[in-house]
Image: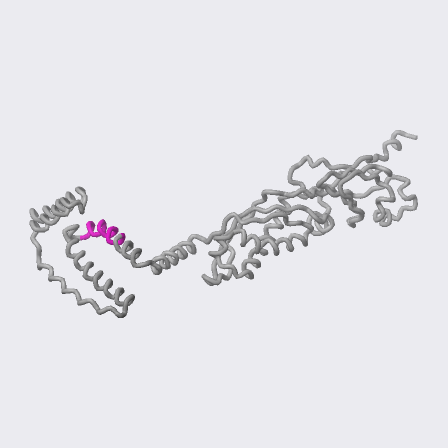
Amino acid sequence: MGIGSFIKKQFIDVLQWNEETEGVLSWRYPMQDFEIQNGGVLIVRESQVAVFVNEGQIADVFGPGTHKLTTQNLPLLTNLKNWDKLFDSPFKSDVYFFSTRVQTGRKWGTPQPITIRDKDFDMIRVRAFGMYSYRVTDPRKFFTELSGTRSTYTRDDVEDQLRGILLASMANSLGASQIAFLDMAANQALMAQEVKGGLADAFARYGIGLDEFNVASVSLPEELQAALDERISAGMKGGMSDAKMAGYTKYQVAQSIPLAAGNEGGLAGIGAGLGAGLTVGQVMGQAMGQALNPGAAPAPAPEAAPAAPAQESIEDRLGKLKALLDKGLISAADYDATKAELLKKLIG
């Protein structure tokens, strides 16, 4: 026998996958010109599945364990090959290993807002982000639907497909759930539960099992969030008690003092403005009291405020300004600025 005939055949005695590369879900054993030795050993580790494929057709599937390759444990492949010698000689077949470990900590998010119908705000657009985990549960479906005859099929490859499924399933689930946005934001676990059922069914079509799914945050685009903030603010003001309303009015008056200082006439014109404001406030207060207590006699109408003098001298205005400073109603900086303005008008 010549040397060429001696090396003509190369046999494989042990088939196994060590999963040396992270993130690989499917790996084809590199057969090249090798043949599998009859009686060879197939080693399938925990969290793995091995599949024999003959001319693109799936034959036998092996779970974790050590398997001796004979006609007894390769019945489908033997039938497909239809060997007369029943594996007395070496045979050739493609062998694929699949990782069934849980792929944890996978992030998902909506790059563009999803438009849904909301029972409180009609049509809104929402963004959401979170985490999920999955695993290969049906190697046959995974092979026929996704990985195919590629030498390797990675986590990144499958997640490109899952991302589109996830967003489509989320839009359908949220649209059909009729859960208000405010309830979603307040209970993200409820939102995750609504989405997970439909998402699991969509994943199963590809031989993938959804292990966990959670929602870390749900939000509106900036312009819609601003509109929601305004609506919440208006609702808070509309639901104020009398005591809160009085406090809110005091707050508004305090806020208006710096604005009045910047108007023409400065703080010297506050007296007339506050007088008019108090008169209006009395009228509003009486009207609210009458509405809350219809049986009470109406309060006498307030006396008309005395007409403001046609023109107040600058000296009088300076005197009033100094009185406000002495009582601590204005700061020294406000006093100096307004005083300088009035003296400038007096001197010309």
Horizontal side of residue 103 vs 253, given as left or right = right
Q: Is residue 25 magenta?
A: no
Nearest the eye: 167 or 189: 189
Outermost top residue: 3
Nearest the eye: 188 or 39: 188
Q: Position of residue 4 (x, y in %)?
A: 87, 31
Q: Position of residue 324 (x, y in %)?
A: 14, 47
> Eyeballing the image, is 304 above or below 327?
below
Quarter occupied by the N terminus: top right
Q: Main secondary structure of the magenta part?
A: helix
Horizontal side of residue 237 vs 260, given as left or right = right
> Eyeballing the image, is 187 above or below 336?
below
Q: Is residue 111 visible?
A: no
Q: Which residues are magenta?
A: 251-263
Colour mapping used in the image: one colour
Q: Position of residue 171 (x, y in %)?
A: 55, 57
